Amino acid sequence: MSFPYISINNPLILASASPRRKELLKQVGIPFKVVEGDIDENGEDGTPYEICERLAEKKALSVYKASGKNWVLGADTIVVKDGIIMGKPENAEDAANMLQRLSAGDHEVITGYSIINPDGGLAVTAHVTTTVTFKRLTPEEINSYIKTNEPFGKAGAYAIQEIGAFMITGINGSYSNVVGLPLFEVIDSLVRAKALERFPSFFFP
């Protein structure tokens, strides 16, 4: 079965309130609108890869029911260090503990994404992993960074595309994945699922 391609009059539904994911989709010019999914993100079992894929699916499916007949994209990003999943810090102490754990070593940033077709069928669910390396952080650097308020609302308590870049000595893999959405893989999946006719493209109404 074929479905209408994403267009200005038939935008992709982004099942996320993340301003970073919105900026990434704007960057590549894909027409979209935001409908935030309402799901319980706690109590998921499995590997970090399975968990982020499952949460991405749940977000996409919860939004599809209220979105009409559009393509829907859900995503979930987690940070993993030594097998421990690090979500968004609850307070300054939590952020400091996360940053101390990430200091002077490698960690993984995993984004799961899920694409639902206009008939409610699951078109794609996958994940992308990027390895990020941090410099050794001093207590003063950690405290100063927390005072910027940037760590809050970010998985792993940092933002690679903002002030947090000062901590990062290298990455192996997708940069946009660390920001919140692996653009190469998502666009490739949208083309393969026939949500996009081609890319790059001029999006007609």
Image (cartoon, helix red, strand yellow):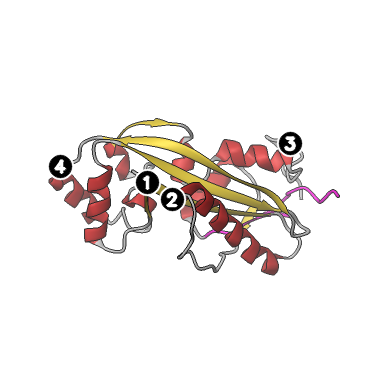
- Residue tagged by mark 2? 78
Which residue occupies 74% across, 36% down?
Answer: 198
Whether residue 148 appears in this view of the structure is no
Q: Secondary structure at mark 1?
A: loop
- Residue tagged by mark 3? 198
> Identity of the amino acid at label 3?
Arg
Closer mark to the observer between disc 1 and disc 3: 1
> Identity of the amino acid at label 1?
Gly
- Does the magenta portion include 12? yes
Few, some or many residues within 10 Å of mark 2 (<14, 14–19, 20+): many
Task: Identify the mark at residue 181; answer none if there is no mark.
Answer: none
- Residue tagged by mark 4? 138
Few, some or many residues within 10 Å of mark 4 (<14, 14–19, 20+): few
> Identity of the amino acid at label 2?
Ile
Earlier-in-chain disc, 3 versus 2: 2
**Where does the magenta region start and end?**
1-16
Q: Secondary structure at mark 3?
A: loop
Which residue occupies 39% across, 42% down?
Answer: 161
